[in-house]
Image (spheres, coloured by chain):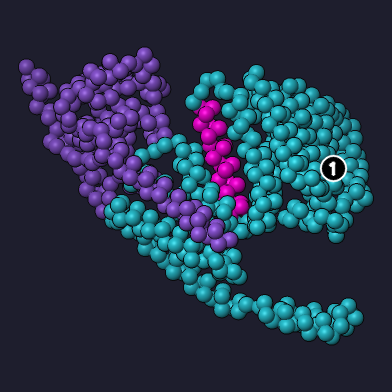
Chain colours: A purple, B cyan
């Protein structure tokens, strides 16, 4: 018993402590890796009071028609993002199968849907961002304002998974379209 | 212990005055201030609930790092408490330590969820479960004493195996038979470990419980498989060719396990457990090969397996297990009689026959369990399956 107490028990107690600490450290390091991008959002769904405090939205990837990312096979698609973070110049939809290292190196970032997230296979199309409860009303108003464009800052980690970081707003740039109409 | 009972026994001449006095003294020594303890417990519960409410109400306002740090500190504090309690005997050493161990393990499991929330990561459920199992198994198995810990560990093990199996099926088009046979044999491995450890460990009761939970999970899983085999060809895993491969590998694995268990424990329990394992392996293999929708054949396989469990119960004197076996076989017979009389139902004759058979089976089952059931006071080996006395 005394040998057990002196030797095995401290080891058995230290193992979970060390293991959990290590996992915390790794998760923290991983969360800092990757690149951050700004993506405009559309088709928002204001806070869903029943399911928690978050804004649900759809990504409005620049220069990609929405239909190019088919919902039913989104998990087999990846997005090749080009630009200088956080500004996206262009986005290209690609098949994950038949994907090579070479192709990936031509992208500044590659985004894939994380099948284990809340959005599942739809992760390239829609997502959610958690907002503090007190600021919910403020976000509600801004999202409903047609003069404001919501922009989500996302992080794409080394695995290609997307994490929304923050939500901001800027005046909508509808000037171009109006000019076209005038012409 | 109320004095009233002792007085009744004294009056009836079952015990003499000396014995009555000794019982009173013994019970007085053992008595605990229950009222005081329950008030203290109530107070502790109120404090705990209050803390949880305070934290939950302000969850958003507490920065994630602080929350995680507090979570980690709680875990470290519990580790320290368990270390200090280890040499203690009695109430503190036995019960409180187990409760703290349980809380520690649950806090460790929720830490993964907490990390995922703070860092917004997500992963398949089996991954944190496997890591939890690796990190906490040594501690739980080295220090656990009661059913709280043995049950938690078994639930963790089986939960990991089940979630991994589900994930594996999602990931792969052509599953590996050997892999699946290993995953589905987890209760058997736990059983072997329990029988072996029971021999060398000072905490026999704990390993006995692990063995009981493992055996119960195994019997339940085999039963489910036999039922699934009869419902759809291919059973739980779908009608694939690899089903019989898996059953063949299981046949080897389980027979080897039975042999190992018998070599560890050559008295009644070892023979009984080995018997159940071998019977399950053979019957499950036959069921997988046959893959038939024939009601009679499936019922015979099902009842053969449970008859083997019943034989083991008689052999080792597990009285209550035997009663359960009789009830289950009787139920299966009744279901069979309805299955076979199904096409006669329209005439009403089938219903009458099924009803008569049901009554006959019930009466017979009652007789069988009276005549064959092991007696309450088992001779020789004390009831090894403690939970089934």
- Residue reaching furthest front? A3
Can residue B221 be seen here? The reply is yes
Q: Quadrant of the N terminus of chain B?
A: bottom right
Examine the structure image and report whether residue B154 is included in the region drawn in magenta: yes
Q: What's drawn in magenta, residue-wise?
A: B149-170
Q: Quadrant of the C terminus of chain B?
A: bottom right
What percent of the width, then of the height, locates residue A86?
17, 31
What residue is shown with label 1?
A: B311
| Up-down relation of residue B257 to residue B172 (above or below) | below
Can residue A45 be seen here? The reply is no
What percent of the width, then of the height, locates residue B43?
48, 73
Q: Left or right? Give the position of A27 relative to B317.
A: left
What percent of the width, then of the height, locates residue B280?
75, 34
**Looking at the magenta stretch, what is its main secondary structure?**
helix
What percent of the width, then of the height, locates residue B313?
82, 47
Q: Give the residue at x 7% y 22%.
A: A179
Q: Left or right? Give the position of A119 relative to B351.
A: left
Examine the structure image and report whether residue B379 is included in the region drawn in magenta: no
Q: Give the residue at x 65% y 49%.
A: B197
Q: Give the residue at x 33% y 30%.
A: A159
Q: Give the residue at x 72% y 55%.
A: B387
Dot 1, crowdedness within 10 Å: few (<14), some or many (≥20)?
Answer: some
- Residue reaching furthest top? A98
């Amino acid at each position: 018993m005394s040998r057990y107490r002196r030797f095995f028990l401290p080891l058995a107690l230290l193992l979970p402590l060390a293991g959990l600490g290590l996992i915390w450290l790794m998760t923290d390091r991983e969360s800092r890796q990757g690149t951050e991008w700004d993506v405009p959002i559309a088709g928002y769904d204001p806070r869903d009071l029943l399911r928690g405090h978050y804004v649900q939205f759809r990504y409005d990837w620049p220069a990609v028609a929405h239909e190019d990312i088919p919902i039913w096979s989104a998990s087999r698609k990846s997005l090749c993002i080009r630009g200088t973070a956080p500004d996206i110049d262009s986005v290209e939809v690609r098949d994950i199968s038949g994907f090579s290292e070479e192709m990936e190196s031509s992208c500044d970032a590659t985004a894939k849907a994380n099948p284990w997230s809340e959005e599942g296979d739809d992760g390239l199309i829609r997502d959610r961002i958690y907002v503090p409860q007190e600021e919910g009303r403020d976000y509600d108003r801004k999202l409903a304002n047609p003069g404001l464009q919501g922009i989500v800052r996302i992080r794409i980690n080394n695995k290609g998974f997307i994490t929304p970081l923050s939500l901001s707003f800027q005046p909508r740039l509808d000037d171009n379209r109006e000019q076209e109409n005038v012409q | 212990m109320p004095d009233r009972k002792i007085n009744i026994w004294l009056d009836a001449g079952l015990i003499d005055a000396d014995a009555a006095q000794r019982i009173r003294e013994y019970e007085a020594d053992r008595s605990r201030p229950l009222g005081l303890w329950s008030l203290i417990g109530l107070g502790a519960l109120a404090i705990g609930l209050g803390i949880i409410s305070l934290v939950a109400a302000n969850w958003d306002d507490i920065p994630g790092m602080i929350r995680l740090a507090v979570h980690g500190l709680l875990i470290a504090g519990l580790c320290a408490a368990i270390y200090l309690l280890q040499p203690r005997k009695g109430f503190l050493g036995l019960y409180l330590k187990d409760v703290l161990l349980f809380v520690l393990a649950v806090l460790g499991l929720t830490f993964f969820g907490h990390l995922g929330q703070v860092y917004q990561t997500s992963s398949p459920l089996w991954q944190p479960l496997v890591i939890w199992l690796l990190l906490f198994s040594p501690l739980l198995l080295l220090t656990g004493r009661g059913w709280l810990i043995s049950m938690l560990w078994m639930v963790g093990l089986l939960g990991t195996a089940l979630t991994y199996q589900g994930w594996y099926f999602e990931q792969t088009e052509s599953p590996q038979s050997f892999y699946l046979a290993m995953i589905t044999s987890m209760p058997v491995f736990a059983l072997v470990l329990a029988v072996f450890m029971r021999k060398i460990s000072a905490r026999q009761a704990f390993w006995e419980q692990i063995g009981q939970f493992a055996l119960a999970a195994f019997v339940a899983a085999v039963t489910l498989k036999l039922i699934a085999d009869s419902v759809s060809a291919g059973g739980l895993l779908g009608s694939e060719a690899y089903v019989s491969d898996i059953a063949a590998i299981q046949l080897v694995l389980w027979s080897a396990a039975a042999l190992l268990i018998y070599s560890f424990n050559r008295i009644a329990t070892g023979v009984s457990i080995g018997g159940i394992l071998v019977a399950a392996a053979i019957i499950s293999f036959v069921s997988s090969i046959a893959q038939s929708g024939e009601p009679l054949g499936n019922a015979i396989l099902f009842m053969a397996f449970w008859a083997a469990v019943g034989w083991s119960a008689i052999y080792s004197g597990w009285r209550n297990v035997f009663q359960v076996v009789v009830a289950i076989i009787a139920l299966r017979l009744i279901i069979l009689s309805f299955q076979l009389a199904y096409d006669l139902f329209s005439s009403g004759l089938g219903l009458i026959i099924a009803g008569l058979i049901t009554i006959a089976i019930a009466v017979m089952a009652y007789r069988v369990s009276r005549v064959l059931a092991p007696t309450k006071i088992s001779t020789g080996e004390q009831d090894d399956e403690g939970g089934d006395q």
